Image (spheres, rainbow, N blue to C red):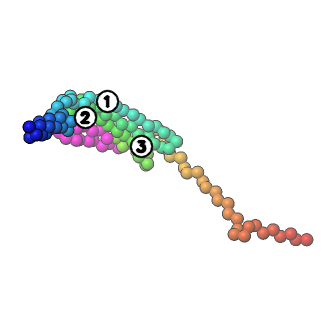
Amino acid sequence: MYFSQSLLFVSLAAMLSQGWCGYDDHYDHHEPAHYSFGYSVNDHHTGDIHSQHESRHGDSVHGSYSLVEPDGHVRTVKYEADHKHGFNAHVSRKEYHHGYHAPAPAPVHHHHEGHHGTAYFHLH
């Protein structure tokens, strides 16, 4: 009797643990993602001018990004990627014609007094 109760307890514990810790072979199949996004920054105060646009349809991604480089040229990268051809990018560079020039740094003025302060002499 003790043996059969022990066997029943061990079997029941094994079955219950499968439900809590066992392997779940459930697989959620998701369709390939579809999205499209874009943004652009045009901050003439800091000189930060860039943009990016991208879209994905199934396993194919297409996009581009561009930025104004410190020398004033615009670098544009157009890219596409898929399982058949991999990642391919085309880079172009042209002059930026908006007349933007980064602001010159503000001058810093330092006022320095001597180590022992200012000496005053009165002559009579």
Left or right of 99, for residue 33: left
Residue 95 can be seen, yes or no: no
Label 3's element? strand
User: Residue 11 is drawn in which quadrant?
Assistant: top left
Give how far across and how far down residue 82 sits, in percent.
Answer: 20, 36
Q: Identify the residue at image location x=67%, y=60%.
A: 111
Closer to the camera, 18 or 55? 18
Q: Quadrant of the N terminus?
A: top left
Q: Is residue 93 magenta?
A: yes
Q: Is residue 40 above or below residue 118?
A: above
Give the secondary structure at mark 2.
strand
Q: Earlier in the sequence, mark 1 or mark 3?
A: 1
For residue 22, what is the image quadrant? top left
Q: Tell me the amino acid under the disc marked 2.
A: Val
In the structure shown, which secondary structural element does the residue marked by tag 1 occupy?
A: strand
User: What kind of residue is marked 3?
Assistant: Val
Q: Give the residue drawn at x 22%, y 38%.
A: 81
Q: Which disc, if any, is residue 36?
A: 1
Residues packed near mark 2 inside 10 Å, few (<14), some (14 to 19) or many (20 plus): some
Does label 2 or label 1 sit earlier along the sequence? 1
Q: Which residues are magenta?
A: 77-97
Please name the residue that numbered disc 3 is placed on: 68
Real-space Cα separation, disc 2 to disc 1, in angstroms: 10 Å
From the viewer's side, name the closer residue of 93 and 5: 5
* Residue 57 placement (x, y as % from top left): 24, 29
Say the numbered circle drawn on residue 52.
none
Direction front: furthest residue: 1
Where residue 61 is drawn, which disc sits there? Answer: 2
- Which residue type carries mark 1? Ser
